Image (cartoon, rainbow, N blue to C red):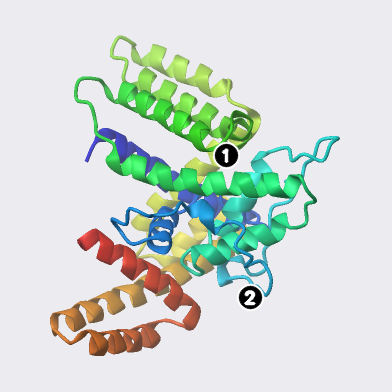
């Protein structure tokens, strides 16, 4: 595994912690920031079979007339409010792209696994239907380009190859430049700037940190001074987000260290996050542990079932019975998506 891929995996893990922080401190309005990796897998699986030369882009899902008669929100979005502030127009009624519009897309796409991609796209279009033309058509075009970009990004990442001739920082710099160009292939420059300016600014901050950390010509004092100066130049909200991130990284370490002492772990939660957030975090941990226990038991039972060599119809019947044994109807949608991904990774 390349250094770039390891670092990207680390950054994705930190992103998950930020989403967790949002759910704890703002439980009524989660706004997931990044699209799950499985969106790309769902797009591939829905649009065409692997190797199909006629594969259509995910943007073909937009404008399919699925907006009416949508079911209630999936469980993960129940009791939450979609991001607002995205319906910005100029004097002529044209849509002004903004980070809030991307947040709207991500809000619904975060439920992938509970619902298939076409339904989630329809939910987004239902929100966009409140716009009048020409803004509505412009928003749909942006959505289509955004979906295609995310699939292209997944394909791009899988095809990435590390260059042993340059250092880690330069490898990352090159890959970031390619990603920035990819965004502007699927989204016009105004949309790309509105959607990704903050992300790209933070990318450059992280890249500068990496270059400072890896500069062997610096003394420890010089390195620390440059890092502090770099951090001081960040916007206030980004500095606050980094502090929150560090708190949750510390919590993950404490959770492992205090796994055998629930009372001490709860005391840590209360001291680090306050009583109310600590209770929500404890409940979330309990749900995650319960899910993991049932998932592991199901996977073991499924492995035994697979080894039994049953005919396809009988195997599928037994697998459905296993899913019903361990998961409720909503969870089974997620399990089906995970099984599909696991099967694809094992092929």
Within 10 Å of the Cα at label 1, are there few (<14), some (14-19), or many (20+) other Cα atoms?
few
C-alpha distance separating marks 1 and 2: 35 Å
Q: What residue would you read off at disc 1? A: 241
Q: Secondary structure at mark 1?
A: helix
Residue 4 in percent (x, y) is at 30, 34
- Give whichever of discs 1 and 2 has the lower sequence position: 2
- Above or below, 321 against 74 in this view is below
Residue at figure coordinates x 22%, y 41% from the top left: 1
Q: Are marks 1 and 2 in contact (CB under 8 Å)?
A: no
Residue 282 in the figure: left or right of residue 24: left
Residue 206 in the figure: left or right of residue 218: right
Q: Residue furthest top?
A: 217
- Give the number of the mark in front: 1 or 2: 2
Q: What residue would you read off at disc 2? A: 71
Q: Secondary structure at mark 2?
A: loop
Of 71 and 18, nearer the camera is 71
Of 342 and 205, nearer the camera is 342
Residue at figure coordinates x 37%, y 55% from the top left: 54
């Amino acid at each position: 595994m390349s250094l770039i891929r390891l670092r990207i995996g680390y950054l994705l893990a930190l992103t998950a912690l930020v989403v967790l922080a949002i759910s704890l401190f703002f439980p009524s309005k989660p706004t997931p920031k990044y699209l799950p990796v499985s969106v790309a897998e769902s797009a591939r699986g829905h649009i065409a079979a692997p190797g199909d030369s006629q594969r259509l882009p995910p943007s073909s899902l937009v404008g399919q007339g699925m907006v009416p008669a949508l079911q209630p929100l999936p469980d993960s979005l129940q009791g939450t409010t979609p991001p607002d502030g995205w319906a910005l127009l100029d004097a002529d009624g044209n849509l002004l792209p903004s980070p809030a519009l991307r947040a709207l897309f991500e809000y619904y796409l975060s439920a992938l696994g509970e619902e298939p991609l076409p339904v989630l796209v329809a939910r987004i279009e239902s929100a966009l239907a409140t716009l009048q033309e020409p803004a509505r058509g412009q928003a749909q075009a942006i959505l289509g380009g955004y979906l295609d970009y995310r699939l292209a990004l997944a394909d791009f990442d899988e095809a990435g190859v590390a260059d042993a001739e340059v250092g880690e920082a330069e490898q990352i710099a090159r890959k970031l430049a390619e990603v920035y160009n990819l965004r502007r292939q699927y989204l016009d420059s105004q949309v790309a700037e509105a959607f990704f300016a903050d992300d790209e600014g933070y990318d450059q901050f992280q890249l500068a940190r990496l270059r400072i950390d890896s500069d062997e010509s610096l003394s420890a004092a010089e390195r620390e001074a440059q890092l502090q100066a770099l951090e001081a130049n960040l916007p206030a909200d980004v500095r606050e987000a980094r502090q929150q991130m560090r708190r949750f990284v510390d919590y993950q370490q404490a959770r492992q260290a205090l796994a055998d002492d629930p009372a001490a772990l709860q005391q840590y939660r209360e001291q680090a996050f306050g009583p109310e957030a600590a209770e929500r975090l404890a409940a979330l941990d309990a749900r995650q542990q319960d899910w993991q226990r049932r998932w592991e038991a199901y996977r073991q039972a499924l492995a035994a079932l697979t080894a039994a060599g049953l005919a396809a119809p009988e195997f599928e019947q037994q697998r459905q019975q296993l899913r019903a044994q361990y998961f409720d109807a909503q969870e089974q949608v997620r399990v089906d998506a995970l099984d599909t991904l696991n099967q694809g990774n094992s092929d």
